[in-house]
Amino acid sequence: MSAETRRESGWPFFLMALLVFLLLAADVLSLFVGKLLDGRLVFLGILVLAGLKWLEAAHSGATIPSFLREYRGFEHRYAGHGAIVALSQYLYYLLESAMVLLMIALFQRAGEIWTRLAWLPWGGLGLTLTWGLAHYASHPEGASTVVLSALLFGLLFVGVRKSVLPSLATVYLAFVL
């Protein structure tokens, strides 16, 4: 069968995204992502994300950024080793951010293949239905923020034409701020 007449199925991409979700595997971002960047949309996405984080902090009564609270907690719990524990946690956040972005890319590709609608944020919808909704069972108090963030990450990914760096930076900032 020639390449022109072969019909591509979205199932492999959907199943790969589910595999990444189920195994919580961090992987190198693949060729599913593009290289173009729209800085205005990245800035808008970061502003919306910062607004969501501010609302979450205001609702919880927090007065200092979460990374400072975490460092202080680590320093109190592991006297003299707070910095290395905090650094390890931020490395973990970077790997989790890469996993989230990989899931977005895979769900986006599956949705595009199935529907031919590249403008729709399939990655955000898939991430919401897996990672986002799973938080209702594991951390119900913050699940709404995770669901909104998943949708925002998917919109941003499509908006920056599937560019890795701004998408990864936004997801990472969401974890550490």
Image: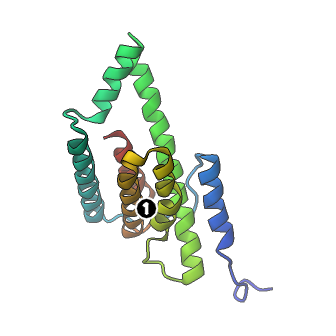
**Left or right placement of residue 133 versus residue 152 in this view:** right
Q: Is residue 69 visible?
A: yes
Mark 1 residue type: Ser
Seen from the viewer's position, the closer of residues 142 and 78 is: 142
The image quarter containing residue 78 is top left
Q: Residue lying furthest bottom in this view?
A: 5
Q: Is residue 166 visible?
A: no
Residue located 67% across and 71% down the image: 11
Residue located 40% across and 63% down the image: 151
Residue assigned mark 1: 163
- Residue 156 image offset from top left, x and y in percent: 37, 64
Seen from the viewer's position, the closer of residues 52 and 38 is: 52
The image quarter containing residue 148 is bottom left
* Neighbourhood count class around disc 1 (C-alpha, 10 Å): few under 14, some 14–19, many 20 upward: some
Residue located 28% across and 65% down the image: 41
Instruction: Name the quarter where the N terminus is drawn.
Output: bottom right
Q: Residue lying furthest right in this view?
A: 1
- Residue 88 image offset from top left, x and y in percent: 47, 28
- SS label for mark 1: loop
Here the colouring is rainbow
Q: In the picture shown, does residue 105 fall above or below 80?
A: below
Seen from the viewer's position, the closer of residues 37 and 43 is: 43
- Residue 51 image offset from top left, x and y in percent: 22, 53
The image quarter containing residue 18 is bottom right
Residue located 46% across and 47% down the image: 97
- Residue 44 image offset from top left, x and y in percent: 25, 61
Instruction: Name the quarter where the C terminus is drawn.
Output: top left
**Left or right placement of residue 51 versus residue 153 in this view:** left
Q: In the picture shown, does residue 167 fall above or below 119?
A: above
